[in-house]
Amino acid sequence: MNTANKLTMLRVVLIPVYLILWHIDAPWSIYAALAVFVIASLTDLLDGYIARHYNQVTDFGKFMDPLADKVLVLTAMACFCGAGRFPDWALVIVIAREFAVSGLRLVAVDNGRVIAAGWSGKVKTASTMVCLCLMHLAAPILSGLPNYLDWACVIIIAATTLYSGIEYFVLNRDVLNWNK
């Protein structure tokens, strides 16, 4: 297993660690969960760089890297949703977009075409990870107060998710042949 794939697997291993830390009822646990989330998010940047720069791109990495990213982000969103800080409708938007884009990619592959990650998808991922980090930081600071930062983050996440999902379908609409 090459270095890029090891970093991807580290991200996978950190997901249950994040969950455990999230559910510990201690003042320090949200910061520990944030630290794990940040480390896991940074492995996403690092493994992609290493894979491309050192020619370590593998089929395993092409499959596991985006899966690890999605599970990490959806885990954090589900935790915030359970805490009443991330609305369920926003979580559904994110999940629906991921299923829709994955389905589009499957149809494209069936037609001999690969749909690479677009710029808007990278912006969505980066802004989502930054917003989730901000939400972790805001938790203990704004306890009991209306949390406008949470709502700003939810709006940013939902907007970038919707935009990137729509863009994937607009730019690749020819993949979906309605007559077949």
Image (spheres, rainbow, N blue to C red):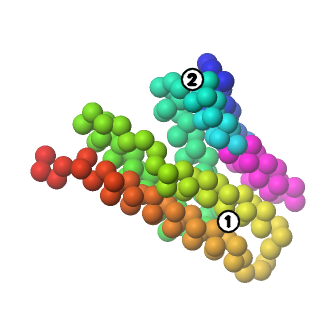
Image-based side of 118 in relation to 109, left or right: right
120 part of magenta stretch = no
Residue at image location 45% in from the left, 63% down from the top: 163
Identify residue type, mark 1.
Ala
Q: Which residues are magenta?
A: 19-41
Residue 157: % across, % down: 56, 64
Residue at image location 27% in from the left, 53% down from the top: 173
Identify residue type, mark 2.
Asn
Q: Secondary structure at mark 2?
A: loop
* 146 over 39 or under it: above or below: below
Give the Cα separation between the discs numbered 2 and 1.
42 Å
User: Considering depth in this image, is 54 or 87 the residue closer to the camera?
Assistant: 54
Instruction: Give the residue pinned by disc 2.
Output: 55
Residue at the extreme right of the image, as rendered: 27
- Which of disc 1 and disc 2 is earlier in sequence? 2
User: Considering depth in this image, is 166 or 77 the residue closer to the camera?
Assistant: 166
Is residue 165 something one can see in this rendering?
yes
Which quarter of the image is occupied by the N terminus? top right
Is residue 24 something one can see in this rendering?
no
User: Considering depth in this image, is 157 or 144 the residue closer to the camera?
Assistant: 157
Residue at image location 67% in from the left, 65% down from the top: 83
Image-based side of 60 in relation to 179, left or right: right
Residue at the extreme top of the image, as rendered: 1
Instruction: Give the residue pinned by disc 1.
Output: 83
